Image (cartoon, rainbow, N blue to C red):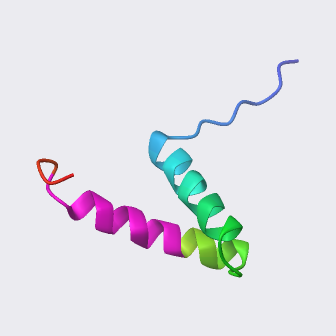
Amino acid sequence: MASPQSFRTPYDRRVELVSHAIKDNSKLSGTAAEELAVHVLHALNSIPETMR
């Protein structure tokens, strides 16, 4: 029997990457770091691409 595969979107991978960076450089918990990562990515995505 094949093992179940989990599909992670590129957005999920970006949230995880930012969340790890936040956890490694602050005293925030994992949940708080993930919530902050979502806000950070939303802010970055709202910047027009020509400005990035």
Measuring 34% from the left and 65% from the top, which residue is drawn there? 42
Percent position (x, y) of residue 48? 14, 56
Q: What type of secondary structure mainly makes up the magenta span? A: helix
Percent position (x, y) of residue 35? 54, 74
Quadrant of residue 20 within the rendered picture: bottom right
For residue 42, above or below residue 36: above
Percent position (x, y) of residue 31? 67, 75
Measuring 61% from the left and 73% from the top, which residue is drawn there? 33
Measuring 50% from the left and 49% from the top, which residue is drawn there? 14
For residue 38, above or below residue 26: above
Instruction: Spot the residue most to the top.
Output: 1
Instruction: Spot the residue most to the right.
Output: 1
Percent position (x, y) of residue 22? 60, 68
11 in magenta? no
Q: Which residues are magenta?
A: 36-48
For residue 5, above or below residue 36: above
Quarter of the figure that contains the N terminus = top right
**Residue 36 horizontal side relative to residue 43, left or right:** right
Q: How many marks?
A: 0
For residue 14, above or below residue 42: above
Given residues 1 and 8, the one toward you in this image is 8
Given residues 11 and 2, the one toward you in this image is 11
Quadrant of residue 16 within the rendered picture: bottom right
**Residue 20 horizontal side relative to residue 47, left or right:** right
